[in-house]
Amino acid sequence: MSSTADVKKSSDIRAGGDRRIEIIDISTRMFLDHGFAGTSMSQLADACGIRKASFYHHFRSKDELFIQCVIKGYESALVRLAQLEQDDALTHDERVSHALEVLYEVTVNSPAGKISPLIAEVSRSMPELSERFFNENILLQRETLLKIVQRGSLSLAMFTTLPDLDALFPTEKLKKGHCDAILAYLARPRNGTSG
Amino acid sequence: MSSTADVKKSSDIRAGGDRRIEIIDISTRMFLDHGFAGTSMSQLADACGIRKASFYHHFRSKDELFIQCVIKGYESALVRLAQLEQDDALTHDERVSHALEVLYEVTVNSPAGKISPLIAEVSRSMPELSERFFNENILLQRETLLKIVQRGSLSLAMFTTLPDLDALFPTEKLKKGHCDAILAYLARPRNGTSG
DNA sequence: GTCTATACGCTGATAGAC
DNA sequence: GTCTATCAGCGTATAGAC
């Protein structure tokens, strides 16, 4: 399906322009809706209003198209973060707060966040994409967030544990929190006994 | 791909026995790993150690096999809930608490929970499966949970709002909670100013 | 209940005219 | 830059022997 050479920089773009962007947007929607294997080039061609063969003028393969969809998905979020880092109109606290909002949107709610399952789907056939997603998205997110926080006069020492940020939200803890919330809710209007 | 007649009761099982169970378990693992469209009958046959054609002795179609995988996925959780409801060795509070644990496992951590994205993948081609998943899994979960809670001497009135349980965990609220947690974490060892 | 052989549509992809 | 025509291979599914 794919080879190591399939994941490269923008150098293997065959053509540039609005049409390309349009195709990527439409294809992203299709991939999100039907999965990678579940979306055929014929379906994509129909959705884009062109013939199947014309697709190969813009993208050398289905893999390549998908990779571009994924990259475009997370690039916009990275741009937003980068702009935030440069925004002098905001206070430091506002920048940090907005950055967290952006990260949350990207990770949980946005189309970019919903791409993750697709990457899981193709992780075996396109391992380079998974790696790239991690290096160019996850790691860059963390770096930019770090820069944003560093713009304030905070001591650097406190960020030495930043990579452990994930540990802040362990499944077990969240689970207990959720269960406790339900139990508290159920217990609230209790009138009788409990046995 | 599928017709209305494809989703039925166990009457359209072609054969019963251990082999069938084994095939379902292996296939479930494959579907979870590669998606529905991403898993071919050849791959499934290889994984099960039989020929492609032999598959059709057990299941009339790939759709039918998938449906059985989904159903078996959530059935075990429902059985656990039902047993819990009958368990007189536990106190009422224990039963409620354990039920929440089971629901959490089923929804978030278990293979059954991970099936949800697969159902989303095929929701357009197998709408009956989505409906069945909701009616036989989601609704039954709620019903059994309700029964478990009702075994205590709590007033029925408090459950009139149970269908709104989802509202307890609105995205915005959770989001704010997570962001606040990160901010609190970042602010903790703060030594300098914040502008 | 599993096998071999086979039907046939659809897949991703290419060649070459315009 | 889009098209028609075409390819080899794989997809699901069936027929029928053992």
Image (spheres, coloured by chain):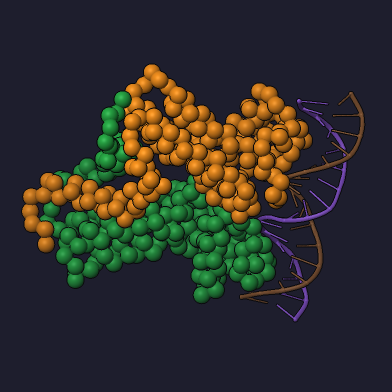
Chain colours: A orange, B green, C brown, D purple
Residue B144 in sight: no
Q: Is residue D15 above or below residue A159?
A: below
Image spot of residue A50 (x, y percent): 72, 29
In-front residue for pair A76/C12: A76
Location of residue B19 (image quadrant): bottom right
Q: Is residue D11 above or below residue A35?
A: below
Which residue is pictured at 45% across the width and 62% down the height? B72
Image spot of residue B181 (x, y percent): 29, 41
Q: Is residue A70 above or below residue A82?
A: below
Which residue is pictured at 41% across the width and 31% down the height? A148
In-front residue for pair A103/B55: A103
Image spot of residue A162 (x, y percent): 38, 44
Image spot of residue B166 (x, y percent): 30, 42
Location of residue B175 (image quadrant): top left
Q: Which quarter of the rendering shows the C terminus of chain B?
A: top left
Which residue is pictured at 67% across the width and 34% down the height? A10
In-front residue for pair B104/A115: A115
Which residue is pictured at 17% across the width and 61% down the height? B92
In-front residue for pair A30/A131: A131
Location of residue A103 (image quadrant): top left
Q: Is residue B92 above or below residue A170?
A: below
